[in-house]
């Protein structure tokens, strides 16, 4: 009889421990942030030139402001800069892993230019200060939220 009582107590203790562990795991799921794997990977590629006045203006003003946002820290930011406007599309200035995206850029595209890439797929291309404000930045925000 004593053995049956001890076995019953042990079963209750083990059952209680399992219950506490299960409840703790459920609470952790509720309070934990979503896993990084479930979030979209966004890359912003800035394309500019050293002798480009609009590029300098964007980098000093909107670019600096963007670097201070929460969105900037949630994406991968890459720069492709050439010494001259005439060399923007040359291989020498493009990292090899970004060259495939360059093919989407027309020969007459202006700079500053941005490529928004989500999960390795080009989703938006925009150039000029107006497109940064009206298209590129809103697209980045929508992809990250």
Image: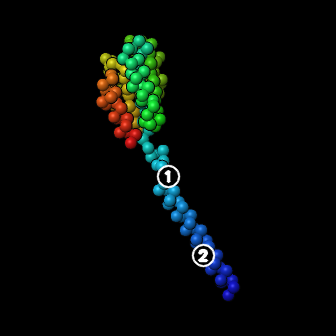
Horizontal and vertical percent position of residue 132: 34, 27
Horizontal and vertical percent position of residue 38: 44, 46
Q: CA distance from mark 2 to mark 1?
A: 30 Å
Q: Which residue: 30% across, 30% down?
A: 134
Q: Which of disc 1 and disc 2 is earlier in sequence? A: 2
Query: In the image, 106: left or right of 95?
Result: left
Q: Which residue: 67% across, 87% down?
A: 1
Is the residue 7 above or below the residue 38 in the image?
Answer: below
Q: Do we see residue 103 in this rendering?
A: no
Report which quarter residue 101 is drawn in.
Answer: top left
Q: Nearer the viewer, residue 19 or 120?
A: 19
Q: Nearer the viewer, residue 43 or 58?
A: 58
Horizontal and vertical percent position of residue 58: 39, 21
Q: Which mark is residue 60?
A: none
Q: Nearer the viewer, residue 132 or 90?
A: 132
Q: Which residue: 33% across, 18% down?
A: 110
- How busy is the neighbourhood of tag 1: few (under 14 within 10 Å), some, or many (20 plus)? few
Report which quarter residue 7 is drawn in.
Answer: bottom right
Q: Which residue: 44% across, 44% down?
A: 39
**Which is closer to the viewer, label 2 or label 1?**
1
The single residue placed furthest to the bottom in the displayed view is 1
Q: Which residue is mark 1?
A: 32
Query: In the image, 105: left or right of 99?
Result: left
Q: Which residue is mark 2?
A: 12
Q: Nearer the viewer, residue 25 or 124?
A: 25
- How busy is the neighbourhood of tag 2: few (under 14 within 10 Å), some, or many (20 plus)? few
């Amino acid at each position: 009889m004593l053995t049956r009582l001890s076995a019953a107590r042990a079963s209750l203790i083990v059952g209680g421990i399992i219950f506490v562990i299960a409840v703790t795991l459920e609470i952790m799921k509720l309070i934990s942030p979503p896993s990084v794997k479930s979030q979209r990977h966004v890359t912003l590629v800035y394309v500019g030139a050293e002798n480009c006045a609009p590029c300098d203006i964007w980098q000093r003003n909107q670019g600096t402001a963007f670097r201070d946002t929460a969105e900037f820290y949630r994406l991968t930011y890459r720069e492709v800069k050439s010494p001259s406007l005439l060399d923007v599309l040359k291989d020498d200035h493009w990292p090899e892993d970004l060259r495939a995206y360059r093919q989407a850029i027309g020969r007459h595209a202006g700079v500053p230019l941005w490529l928004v890439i989500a999960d390795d797929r080009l989703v938006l291309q925009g150039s000029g200060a107006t497109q940064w404000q009206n298209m590129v930045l809103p697209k980045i925000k929508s992809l990250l939220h």
